């Protein structure tokens, strides 16, 4: 009896089916570690492995007499697929679905970069196909094909486990493809995506979230909009929104050798409420996504510029329309070609009365992309009197352009006298260019005073996104930044944009450090104006609420969040998950609240997408 038992064990261990499954398991573990940094063996064994093993077993059963060929072909296909998924993930920072892999062949964008995406280790995924499987075949090829007789039983076993994990996956919302695939299985996530595409409308049965629910998910107790302390403080004022290209928070109140980088903004703070803890939240649409966030208080799409996913001719219930409904004339100014970021579609969708772009704004004093900011502001000043004749109240939305990478300013526009070692560096150029735009904002404010409307105005100034990130920032730049900041340049330095609400007579230089995001700008502005919006906003009035929970798409992996005290970067193809203490920006231990925060963030973002899709259908 005992002997029989030992013999059985020996049979199983020596059986090629066991070896083949073991090789498959190792390959899946490697894939999961590279793609998701998933080291949970149990999760891989229960959720991932049975699915891939099921397909292999079906192959073995179907190929009957040519099982070795089936095994080899399956593994060749699987290794190729894994490599494609790995390269795609490195390029796009998200795992592809069956749909994306299909599309990739139609796009040239990745082509030239493929060589840069691989490391020699990646090719270890072909080790089984090239070496191990041929070796097993060589030593075991004499075994009768019937030695895989148990394959059918295994297929049933794998199907049962696969079915259960797939059913479970269908009970969870699919918000972030990578996050979902990691949690519920790569193949299971494909099934869920196929289903959602087939019903044509993702999130159709999304749970409705009231403003109260949203407040609660962010850790706040809800107060009706009209009962906030700031409600109507700036009622009937003219509104100027100045979205400053690439302006980062650390430049405010910062000096180099006694010279302020933003002397004009710093002076303006005396009549402002300054928020120094507001995060950028743009996706792939950069500047245009910041415009989207400002005018809708909804999350951007993420992997695509949001303007690309809204329908042509759609009328978005935006800040612009709400202001219009409340007696404002509305104008937008940006000195670039209107087709850049499809603003020819975005601006009518948002509902502006007057749209001024490179067609109208003179192409003078060109720096980088287009006319220098002083030309833009001069143009705004030239239009204002006409607008004020036509409308009692004006909303002017001004998008600056000069402070754009590579930040190279002509000598005559360099107002800072920087230390020699800054000369020619990316950071040095950036500071000069920020200083230039700061000067132009200062002059514009002077003009508002001259026009006699400054005291009746509410001016909101904020940055669209970081300027210092990615490949152009060299080691030397990081050293300079460390010198300026007093600490190593971190994600918070990169992602925090300044937010300044200037309202003479109302604000007197207060600084607010509660957490905010660009999604909160619109509700904060509307609250000051005492105007309610007629569709739901995802953000909240920054003056009212002390707690927040923010998501960030594209520049952080799906499932990341920013909370009052922590910043969580979800695992990506490149980096494992990290939870930072935002006060120190040091890594901190995962707290038991972390999963709850991930879930709440995703729920909020998913709901935001649902609102966006709903309003397009109306
Ligand atoms: C393009 C300008 C810059 O019109 O707004 O856009 P960015 O490169 O920052 O997205
Ligand atoms: Mn920009």
Image: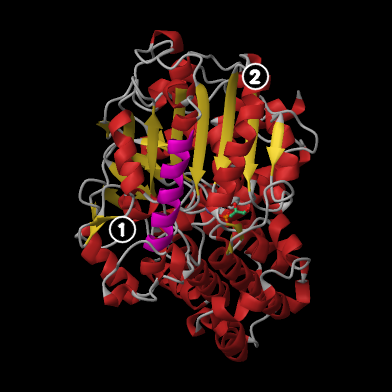
Nearer-N-terminus badge (1/2): 2
Q: Quadrant of the C terminus?
A: top right
Residue at the farthest top position: 227
Tag 2, which secondary structure? loop
Q: Which residue is mark 1?
A: 490
453 drawn magenta: no
Tag 1, which secondary structure? loop
Which of the 4 image quarters holds residue 230? top left
Range drawn in magenta: 431-447
Which of the 4 image quarters holds residue 175? top right
Residue 15 has which mark? none
Q: Is mark 2 within 8 Å of ligand 1?
A: no
Q: Which residue is mark 2?
A: 391
Image location of residue 161, percent across then percent down: 56, 48
Image location of residue 557, percent across then percent down: 47, 53
Specify the principal SS of the magenta part: helix
Relative horizontal placement of residue 372, taking residue 469 as reference (left or right): right
Relative horizontal placement of residue 226, taking residue 613 as reference (left or right): left
The residue drawn where x is 68% and y is 52% is 362
Q: Nearer the viewer, residue 39 or 314?
A: 314
Q: Nearer the viewer, residue 268 or 18?
A: 268
The residue drawn where x is 23% and y is 49% is 589
Q: What is the crowding at mark 2: few (fewer than 14 residues within 10 Å), some, or many (at least 20)?
A: some
Relative horizontal placement of residue 371, taking residue 200 as reference (left or right): left
Does residue 449 sit above or below 306 in this rendering?
Answer: above
The answer to whether residue 159 is seen in the rendering is no
Does residue 214 sit above or below 249 in this rendering?
Answer: above
Does residue 101 sit above or below 175 in this rendering?
Answer: below
The answer to whether residue 532 is seen in the rendering is yes
Image location of residue 564, percent across then percent down: 29, 36
Q: Nearer the viewer, residue 96 or 471?
A: 471
């Amino acid at each position: 009896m005992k002997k029989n038992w030992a013999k059985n064990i020996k049979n199983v261990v020596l059986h090629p089916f066991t070896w083949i499954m073991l090789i498959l398991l190792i390959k899946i573990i490697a894939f999961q570690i590279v793609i998701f940094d998933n080291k949970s063996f149990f999760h891989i064994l229960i959720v991932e492995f049975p699915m891939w093993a099921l397909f292999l077993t079906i192959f073995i059963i179907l190929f009957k007499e040519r099982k070795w060929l089936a095994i080899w072909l399956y593994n060749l296909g699987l290794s190729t697929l894994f490599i494609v998924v790995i390269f795609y993930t490195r390029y796009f920072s998200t795992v592809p679905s069956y749909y994306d892999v299909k599309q990739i062949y139609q796009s040239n964008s990745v082509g030239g970069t493929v060589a840069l995406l691989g490391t020699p280790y990646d090719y270890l995924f072909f080790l089984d196909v090239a070496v191990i499987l041929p070796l097993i075949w060589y030593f075991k090829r004499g075994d009768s094909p019937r030695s895989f007789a148990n394959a059918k039983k295994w297929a049933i076993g794998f199907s049962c486990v696969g079915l259960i994990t797939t059913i479970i996956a269908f009970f969870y919302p699919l918000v972030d493809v990578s996050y979902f695939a990691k949690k519920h299985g790569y193949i299971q996530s494909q099934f869920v995506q196929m289903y959602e595409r087939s019903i044509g409308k993702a999130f159709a049965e999304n749970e409705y979230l009231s403003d109260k629910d949203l407040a609660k998910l962010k850790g706040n107790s809800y107060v009706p909009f009209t009962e906030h302390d700031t409600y109507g403080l700036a009622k009937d004022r003219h509104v100027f929104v100045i979205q400053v290209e690439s302006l980062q928070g650390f430049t405010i109140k910062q000096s180099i050798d006694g010279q302020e980088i933003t002397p004009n903004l710093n002076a303006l703070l005396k009549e402002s409420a300054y928020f120094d803890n507001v995060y950028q939240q743009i996706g792939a649409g950069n500047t245009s996504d910041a415009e989207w966030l400002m005018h809708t208080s909804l999350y951007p799409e993420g992997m695509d510029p949001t303007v690309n996913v809204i329908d042509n001719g759609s009328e978005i219930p935006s800040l612009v329309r709400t202001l219009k409904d409340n007696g404002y004339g509305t104008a937008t100014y940006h000195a670039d070609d209107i087709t850049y970021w499809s603003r020819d579609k975005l601006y009518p969708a948002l509902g502006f009365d007057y749209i001024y772009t490179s067609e109208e704004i003179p192409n003078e004093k060109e720096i980088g992309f287009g006319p220098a900011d002083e030309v833009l502001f001069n143009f705004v000043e030239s239009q204002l009197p006409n607008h004020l004749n036509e409308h009692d109240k004006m909303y002017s939305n001004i998008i600056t352009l000069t402070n754009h990478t590579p930040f190279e300013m002509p000598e005559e526009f360099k107002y800072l006298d920087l230390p020699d070692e800054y000369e020619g560096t990316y950071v040095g150029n950036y500071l000069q260019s920020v200083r230039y735009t700061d000067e132009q904002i200062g002059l514009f404010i002077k003009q508002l005073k001259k026009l006699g409307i400054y005291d009746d105005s509410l001016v909101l100034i904020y940055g669209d996104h970081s300027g210092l990130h990615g490949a152009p920032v060299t080691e030397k730049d990081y050293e300079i930044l460390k010198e300026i900041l007093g600490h190593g340049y971190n994600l918070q330095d990169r992602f925090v944009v300044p937010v300044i609400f200037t309202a003479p007579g109302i604000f007197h230089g207060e600084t607010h450090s509660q957490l905010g995001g660009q999604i909160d700008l619109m509700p904060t502005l509307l609250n000051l104006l005492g105007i309610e919006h007629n569709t739901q906003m995802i953000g909240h009035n920054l003056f009212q609420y002390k707690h927040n929970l923010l998501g960030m798409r594209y520049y952080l992996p799906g499932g990341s969040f920013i909370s009052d005290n922590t910043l969580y970067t979800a695992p990506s193809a490149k980096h494992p998950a990290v939870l930072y203490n935002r006060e120190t920006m040091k890594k901190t231990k995962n707290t038991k609240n972390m999963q709850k925060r991930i879930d709440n963030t995703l729920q909020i973002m998913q709901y935001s997408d649902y609102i966006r899709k709903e309003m397009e259908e109306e």
